[in-house]
Image (spheres, rainbow, N blue to C red):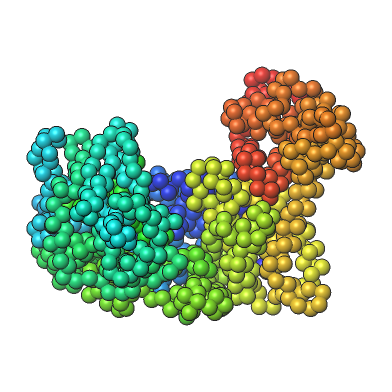
Amino acid sequence: MDYKRKLIEVSLPLEAINKESAREKSIRHGHPSTLHLWWSRKPLATARAVLFASLVDDPSEHPELFPTEEMQDKERQRLFDIIEKLVKWENAGNEALLVQARGEIEKYAVNELPPVLDPFCGGGSIPFEAQRLGLKAYAGDLNPVAVLITKAMIEIPARFSGMPPINPQARAKLGNDAKIKGASGLAEDVAYYGRWMRDEAYERIGKFYPEIDLPAEYGGGKASAIAWIWARTVKCPNPACGCEMPLTSEFWLSKKKGKEAWIEPVADRTAKTIVYKVHKGKGDVPDGTVDRRGARCAACGMPVGLDYVRAEAKAGRMGAQLMAVVAEGKNGRIYLPPEYGKQEAAYDAVPQWEPEGELFGKARVNVPLYGMTKYADLFTSRQLTALTTFCDLIAEARTKAAHDAEATGMDEASAKAYADAIGVYLAFAVDKLSDYCSSICTWVIDRDTIAHTFGRQAIPMVWDYAEANPFCRSTGNFLSCVEWCVRFLKNVVPGIEGRAVQNDAMKGMPFGKGFVISTDPPYYDNIGYSDLSDFFYIWLRRSLKDVYPELFSTVMVPKAQELVATPYHFEGDRDKARRFFEDGLIRVFKNIREAASDEYPVTIYYAFKQSEAEADGDGEHADILHASTGWETMLTGLISAGFAITGTWPMRTERKGRPVANGTNALASSIVLVCRKRPEDAPPASRRQFISALHRELSAALSDMQSGNIPPVDLAQAAIGPGMGVFSRYSAVLEADGTPMTVRSALQLINQELDAYMASQEGEMDAHSRFCTAWYEQFGMNEADYGQADVLSRAKNTSVDKLAALDVLASSKGKVRLLRRDELKPWDELHNDAKGMVWMCVQQMARALEKNGEDGAASIAARISAETAENARSLAYRLYMIADRKGWSAEAYAYNALVVSWPSIQSKAADKRKIEQISI
């Protein structure tokens, strides 16, 4: 090894990183995620921590500075402290902290700071964070929407940092000598020309969004409409009925306490029509008329199959009826029947243009089943008219901004470049508007607002939809969309100017060689970004085609070259799709290897999904490390391309709430693989040599991980790193018959070694605890025959009677079971021998932690010896692994929580010993 290991190859403060990464999901104001929607965007905290830890040396690489393990641990903790501060969103713009972090990176840089490259930039998180850390940031992506998002994050703010606004209003207010921080001048201009666009659009199409005449009960006068609530319709097939039957999931408008409102459909069988009344308060609200099983006519009650609905829709006979209108009232939302909605204005809007392109992505886009085959079909005529108007106004706003820029003394070329930059953010505002202005948007009855199109990574069919008013003051209005972009620009800390380009990573890496490469590549068949991003591309292309002609040269987002295993791109052939992905991934990794610096590791993100883990194993998680085709393909691709894997870190970036609540206790949402170039002359190894090295090195690595208090939930995934590090250091591991060992086989052996290591720790425990652990593994907290307990207790050098006397198990009528935590006696009532049981200590502390927090657990920890405490922590790891494998989520959570809280519990226990002078 002729390189110095980086911190990420040895240890990370995982819990702090994961906590802040998960928390980041709820942060909105100024966060880059609000600039433009992108699917599966990496949290900034994760990207920042991974990059920093990839760029600073581990203290063990400098024995001249840190000669002892104690000194190395202390220095490592100092670096952890920096990371724990860096990952907090509140510190994202803390210049003093960023200077300190940059100083640490510079300390270990060879010659100069290395540039960072992300060849699959997506939402731009990785290059954005590289720039924040003071590094030159480079990015590539095949998808033009991703490229433009990243340009808006790393190119444009840096290029125009410190520049004062050019709009006349701001100039008059600030004067010519105003000092501007960061991109706040650009933010002022985006806000100004966004307001101009809104006002100009209202002059042109405001007549299609008329104000509502309020009834007397609401004080009369006029109010802006927030949304029009429509239901799709088809003709009832019952010959005796024949009305246009509404297809709606529900008739509720609001379920807010004290603000309830709902719709009553009233059928006129003679006229074969349905009219809609709106009621306030609670009432006998009818059920919706359509669900996954089929539909029901609201007039005659006849059940109607979805096949009929689809056939009518495909024949062009699906319509829509206005059921209600939502208006802005002085004291909140006002719900009114259709006659107040002035719906003729919606029919008067005739779009002068509509987007080209067919809808793709059968797995995630199901609207073609209902005749909506083109992107234009996702929008009403009024929505198409509005979005086209706003798109076309961007060119006018750019012309106006360029003229104003020249008036400040800027030359023509610079003025045009600056105006084009303003145009990018205004185009993003139109994209955000389109997300709230499609017929896929629904009305959220418990929040009284509009849900945007992409509530998930799909374009699903919706039956009742909410049509937003872009000129109101509520959700979906254009000025709010502009404001999100403005907040990002005001918050961003521009760094060294970066670059983002469109590039096919299978053909090569952009920009040359010598990069620190960190990237988040496609995940097998998880998300077809090209299919989903067409929704935004159609509007960006109309707005910015003359600004970025090469980026928007195609009618739709490129799909044939997209690196995903999507069968429908290959006429439904799954094998062809799989081979395309696997071959393409190896080419990408070979290109990455060629472009990567020898001094720094490559970090690759892999998104791990619960569905992948449950593909095998009868619902248990014993095989989670090798059950996923995508996971195995990723590892195989890296190794085949000449990489050795030196670390795997689980990043639980998607978790919300506690694990037991969402069923993801054992699964990371992302795993970061740390890789180094394997030497060309790496030798092969036999299966026996591999197993011997695995046993020797993995045990030591696992011991270090436990000493570092890695959460049990992360231990299994983290164990892959050192395990695959052994496997991938060889050119090949040969089986007894001379064939190369597969990655799947290697992962199975790593699993076995992990299990053996955890089981070996039981040897340090007392006999009673060994019995309890073995019984727990076989039966959990369930009953089993006394005879089985008797045999097992003798094997563990104890007895059922002794265990019953210690109040750890119940024995009655020939049945035996372990006592649950809530059945155990309080600590002070236990027999002294029971207090010395490692099993009892774990259960007592876990119960105390659940009921009374860390202080409660510390009260028990203060009364046990250091040796017992260490054995208790080891047992908590072991019990977690057992519970996780068995699928006992609540049990697994309890043991994971105990280990996570362990440092704090022990610290508080030490304080209690001092105060209470406890002797053990």
Number of marks = 0
Residue drawn 88% across and 34% down?
798
Q: Quadrant of residue 719?
A: bottom right
Left or right side of 576 for 413: left
Is residue 654 among the parts visible in the rendering? Answer: yes
- Point out residue 246 in the picture as x, y percentages from the top left corner: 29, 54
In this view, the residue farthest toward the front is: 240
Residue drawn 78% across and 26% down?
807
- Point out residue 892 in the picture as x, y percentages from the top left corner: 64, 43
168 or 649, which is in the foreground?
A: 649
Is residue 163 among the parts visible in the rendering? Answer: no
739 or 804, which is in the foreground?
A: 804
Q: Quadrant of residue 695?
A: bottom right
- Point out residue 904 in the picture as x, y percentages from the top left corner: 60, 34
Left or right side of 241 for 570: right
Residue drawn 39% across and 71% down?
360
Where 464 sits versus 578, above or below? Answer: above
Where 746 sits versus 718, above or below? Answer: below
52 or 505, which is in the foreground?
A: 505
Left or right side of 180 for 631: right
- Point out residue 1 in the picture as x, y percentages from the top left corner: 67, 67
Left or right side of 677 for 330: left
Q: Quadrant of residue 126?
A: bottom left
